[in-house]
Amino acid sequence: MLDKNAIGRSSPPTLNEVEKGAIRRFAEALGDFNPMYYDEEYARAAGYPTIVAPPTFPASFHSAADLRELLGVGIKSLLHAEQAFEYDRPIFAGDRIYVSTRVAEILERTGPAGKMDVAVIEDEGRDEEGNLVFKARRTLVVRASKES
């Protein structure tokens, strides 16, 4: 069972530098060939300063968060159930975004496989001026140990 004292635990911000090649590889992995992700001239003609990252790109960002420490469980026992993103602005090649992670909720649910713990993790990305760029919220499932 996850410790509810984990709620509020957080990581310090970690710098993520957004590179054109990383955006291109991420979009290719998704099979999304929107020219906004590849063609700088096309993105500029659409009113952006450079190529734009796909909406789920922050899933590739790193934070200093060690989920084993934040949640007190082995990383192999976590199942990524869902994730959502909210943006204050698009992410562009050349951005330097600081990402911090926080445990927002710990819940217990019953599913087809029995009892399980659910952890809701929030990531926040800010630019170098401290302006919010995005928020991400992911739900992780941990199966509770079986009672004897």
Image (cartoon, grey):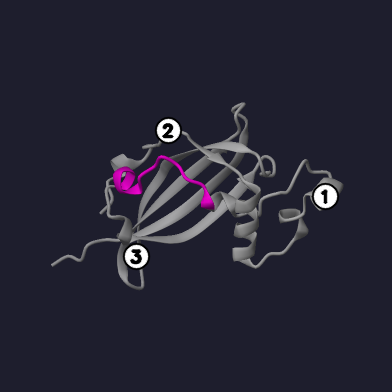
- The furthest residue to the top: 129
- The furthest residue to the front: 21
Q: Residues within 10 Å of mark 3 (few under 14, many from 20)?
A: few
**Vertical position of residue 34 compared to residue 21: above or below:** below
Q: Quadrant of residue 142?
A: bottom left
First in sequence: mark 3 vs mark 2: 2
Q: Residue at x 71, y 55 (%)?
A: 37
> Mark 2 sits on what residue?
12
Q: Residue at x 51, y 49 (%)?
A: 137
Dot 3 amino acid type: Thr
Badges 1 and 3: C-beta atoms under 8 Å apart?
A: no
* Pair 3/2: label in front: 2
* Percent x, y of residue 114: 30, 69
**Vertical position of residue 25 compared to residue 87: above or below:** below
Q: Nearer the viewer, residue 31 or 19?
A: 19
Membership of 70 in magenta stretch: yes
Element type at marker 1? helix
Dot 1 amino acid type: Glu
Element type at marker 2? loop
Q: Residues within 10 Å of mark 1 (few under 14, many from 20)?
A: some
First in sequence: mark 1 vs mark 3: 1
* Percent x, y of residue 85: 59, 50
* Percent x, y of residue 28: 64, 64
Count of labels in the image: 3
**Vertical position of residue 119 compared to residue 147: above or below:** above
First in sequence: mark 2 vs mark 1: 2
> Mark 1 sits on what residue?
41
Badges 3 and 2: C-beta atoms under 8 Å apart?
A: no
Magenta range: 60-71
